[in-house]
Amino acid sequence: MLLCVKCLGLAFSMRSILRSLLFNSRKNVKANVNKIVSVLNDITKERLIVQGTIFHGHLIKTGISSQKHIAIKLLIMYFKSRKPKEIDQMLKEFDGFNLVVHNCLITANLEWGKLDEARRLFDEMPERNEVSWTAIISGFLRFGKVDEAICYFERNPFQNLFSWTATISGLVQNGLSFKAMKLFVEMLQSGVMPNNVTFTSVIRACGELSDFYLGACVLGLIVKVGFEHDLSVSNSLITFNLRLNDTVSARRIFDRMQSRDVVSWTAILDMYVQKGDLTEARRVFDEMPERNEVSWSTMISRYSQSGDAEAAVNLFYCMVQQGFKPNKSCLASVVSALSSLEALITGRIVHGHILKIGIEQDAFIGSSLVDLYCKCGSSKDGRVAFDSILEKNVVCWNSMVSGYSLNNQLEEAKELFDKIPQKNNISWNSLITGYLEYEKFDEVFEVFSDMLLSGEQPNKSTFSSVLCACASLASLERGKNLHGKVIKLGFHSDVFVDTALLDMYAKSGNVESSKKIFKRMPKRNEISWTAMIQGLAENGFAEEALPVFEEFERTKSVAPNELILLAVLFACSHCGLVDKGLHYFNSMEKVYNIQPNSRHYTCVVDMLSRSGRLSEAEKFILDMPCEPDVQAWAALLSGCKTYRNERMAVRVAEKISELAEKHPEGYVLLSNVYASAGRWLDVLHTRKQMKEKGLKKSGGCSWIEVRNQLHSFYSQDGSHNESTEIYEVLDLMRSEMQLI
């Protein structure tokens, strides 16, 4: 829109000039030339070559195009637009050697990267001025030809402010800050005073060198020369202080600036973003009188990274509505935010925009799109996005493997994983996590073994996942072997690995080892405390679990969360501390400001039911602020079975049948209640109801570990490769037992 306005303005200017040339061509030629030069400058700046070519045609018709100043401006316009045919035609209008034209030719070739041609033109010049020398020095430095540029600088007979500044700036851009500072000192010794451009480069050099003392000396000189209020110098000083992590000085300079531009505001915005102070960053963003794509992208990216996906997406909408074009980084951040929100429809719209501007082949954008589609359950579209990426890096491959794993397409994940050209530990972890999520424990161990054989070192994420698989299977021997590797690779002090270890030992029944790990942990988080409390309670040490929670409250290292309090309620339930459990439950909102969820309510029902307070448990369920779920009623039904309360059991079972048409647990419990009371006809009736509704009781599972190999067995299962021999041995044992 802004470009259209500028085009319209230039059209009016061109029309006005042409009218003036037609009706007043002989009068005030100088004024017309100045206006034409101004319009050509605007055309060149905005790169409006079509309008410029049309204007050139009209100037030829009026006979003024060959005027020296206008011809040079036309030549520059064609140089900037890279129009070789028009350039050759313009050069014919200049007779003999023209210094300005040659300088333009050298500058153009340097901009196009034709260094040899620029050097040839420079060497063939019969005479040169300071512009010629400065152009050749700057051009060679821009392309990293530092030694050649320095040679030209040393040969330069016009060593003025511009050549010194060009050389210093070029050295800084090439990462030669120390050399730049040395040259700056020589400049001062030669008596040449720096300007704002020089100081901007010198301050950047001080920042690159992280030299506070040197920066302070330069600042003193800036004040002495009188550039302390210059906009570009102030912006550089802000960046310098931020590089040294001196945010106080950076903010002080910003507050004292007499004028600010978008660079100043964006630097301060980035300061708060880097500090993680999103509130202050948003305040600065809202106060900005002018924003650019960088400031919008900075804010959107930070919202996305901090997990505030809604704020990121809302800000993106505002950005687009105000006519700004999002860059690659911004689009990747928005796609990531949409992934978190699982906003598939909006994601498709953004993907459409990405296709329109033609960056879908970019690895950074492509991997974000893969993540979006897979998190929204559309791995097919994720694969299309993956296949569109031109040069896939390991991040792209990992994203697609994770996407397949997330959607339980484990065969596709493994197939793609095997094709990854260069795997890293994230690649291995993606596959391991996928198998773990869907309880494919054999595959977890198999992939982990392959990872070790490949020479890839596992990291803390790998150990946490594999230890979790050991915990799920109570595979103590495997867990101990892993513990040895953890110590060997130096991960035994990591809070996540230590937590996984203590959880593995607790779930494997080795509570003492679990307690030892917990005691020696240098740092604990809420998951560590929860695992320890839960582990003690599940292994019959509920009395020891509560003192651990009391210790947790005393340390105040982290605030209690809903999981810790659930573990505490579980411990109270398993050691019969009903009143204490009710106290903790009632404290959740009043003391800890935590809203109980259905799991907490179910735990209280279980606690009351285990202690025989069935009427109180039923009343508690009926008084729940939320709709009671199947688990709460099932906990009460279990209590009815224990205390043989048939009347209440029937009533509770009816509630379960209303809520759980597809859940057999309630019917199984009710059947067991009837069986305990010897009411076999009711048992048959309950079983018949299950059959009519197509409900089946989940088969029990047992497993045994032999020589580091896990063998699983299900009720009436014949899938084991040695099941025939196993059943024969069982039949033999049964026969021998009958003889006893």
Image (spheres, rainbow, N blue to C red):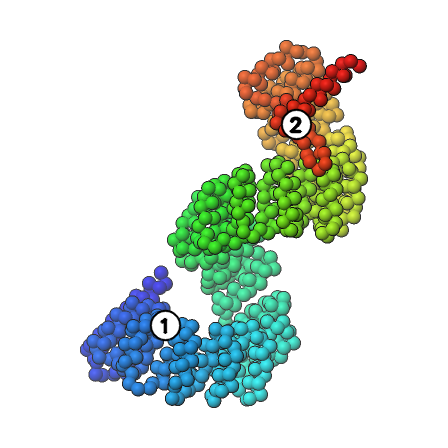
Please say whether residue 587 is visible from this viewpoint.
no
User: Could you say which is closer to the camera, residue 502 or residue 602?
Assistant: 502
What's under tag 1, amino acid-wise? Lys
Task: Indicate the quadrant containing the C terminus: top left, top right, bottom left or bottom right.
Answer: top right
Q: Which mark is residue 80?
A: 1
Determine whether 211 is above or below 709 in the image. Answer: below
User: Which image quadrant is residue 75 in?
Assistant: bottom left
User: Could you say which is closer to the camera, residue 56 or residue 101?
Assistant: 101
First in sequence: mark 2 vs mark 1:
1
- Report, in whole angstroms, how far the alpha carbon at label 2 lies from the one at label 1: 79 Å
- Circle 1: is it few (<14), some (14-19), or many (20+) Cα within 10 Å? some
Task: Indicate the quadrant containing the N terminus: top left, top right, bottom left or bottom right.
Answer: bottom left
Please say whether residue 281 is visible from this viewpoint.
yes
x and y percentages locating residue 472 in the rendered image = 68, 36
Question: Residue most toward the left?
Answer: 23
- Which residue is labeled 2 in the image? 722
Q: Nearer the viewer, mark 2 or mark 1?
A: 2
x and y percentages locating residue 454 in the rendered image = 63, 49
Q: Which mark is residue 669?
A: none
Secondary element under disc 1, as helix, strand or loop, is helix
User: Which image quadrant is residue 431 in?
Assistant: top right
